[in-house]
Amino acid sequence: MSRDLGAERVLVADRSPDAVRWSRRHHREVTGREATGVVLDLWRPLPIVDGAADLILDVFAPRNPPEYARILSPAGAVIVVVPTSRHLAELRAAGSLLEIPDGKDERVIEQFTAAGLSLAGRRPVDHSFSAAEDQLAQLVAMGPSAHHRAEGEPVEARTVTASVEVLAFTQHRR
């Protein structure tokens, strides 16, 4: 399946080389186009010129709102996906994941507003799905909970809920 997402140039950036590699491969499979990838520390100044990004997508990644505001084009948008306290609740109940604090979305909104961006929209997304044991283990391994779990410890849940808040930010209108 090939879709044209309308993006002429795509830059995939993450601290994890595996995440960059996977994202580039997935982008090529979906769009038939190559994406540039870079491994970097998102907490530091980003090596991107001012106003160059039409769209910034941040999914469960470290956020750098001042840098996102700097590199965002005047007509651009930042989309931030934030887990809710219900996200993967079944794995959390089984002791496989750390808790997600209530109000995380509000703290993200405050951070982006302080950086000069305005909340343009928000949408909750909830979806339950069945997952095999290896998929469940991958879900646990990809986040901070992986550092708090014994290697090879079985994951019990079979159906899990993905629950996120999708937040869209734009430049303050003057």
Image: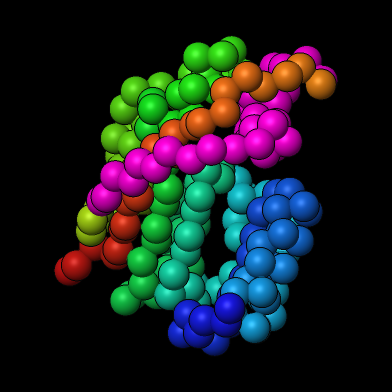
Return the x and y of residue 9 as percentages of the image width and height.
Answer: 58, 82
Q: What is the residue that sits farthest to the right in this orientation?
A: 151
> Which residue range is magenta in the image?
122-151
Could you tell whether 165 is left or right of 136 in the image?
A: left
Along the viewing direction, whichever of 18 and 120 lies nearer the viewer? 18
Along the viewing direction, whichever of 68 and 39 lies nearer the viewer? 39
18 shown above or below 47: above
Return the x and y of residue 149 as percentages of the image width and height.
Answer: 72, 17
Return the x and y of residue 71 as percentages of the image width and height.
Answer: 48, 67
Q: Which quadrant, please, contains the C terminus?
A: bottom left
Say which residue appears at 77% left-offset and 52% top-offset: 18
172 shown above or below 161: below
Q: Does the stretch in magenta take in 140? A: yes
Q: What is the residue that sits farthest to the left in this orientation?
A: 174
In the rendered image, which quarter is residue 69 located in?
bottom left
Say which residue appears at 70% left-offset and 17% top-offset: 148
Q: Which quadrant, please, contains the N terminus?
A: bottom right
In the rendered image, which quarter is residue 35 located in?
bottom right
Along the viewing direction, whichever of 129 and 123 lies nearer the viewer? 129
Say which residue appears at 46% left-offset and 24% top-offset: 89
> Residue 51, can we see it?
no
Return the x and y of residue 171 as percentages of the image width and height.
Answer: 29, 64
Say which residue appears at 53% left-offset and 38% top-offset: 130
> Residue 28, can we see it?
yes
109 shown above or below 150: below
Could you tell whether 144 is left or right of 172 in the image?
A: right
Q: Does the stretch in magenta take in 44? A: no
In the rendered image, which quarter is residue 128 located in?
top left
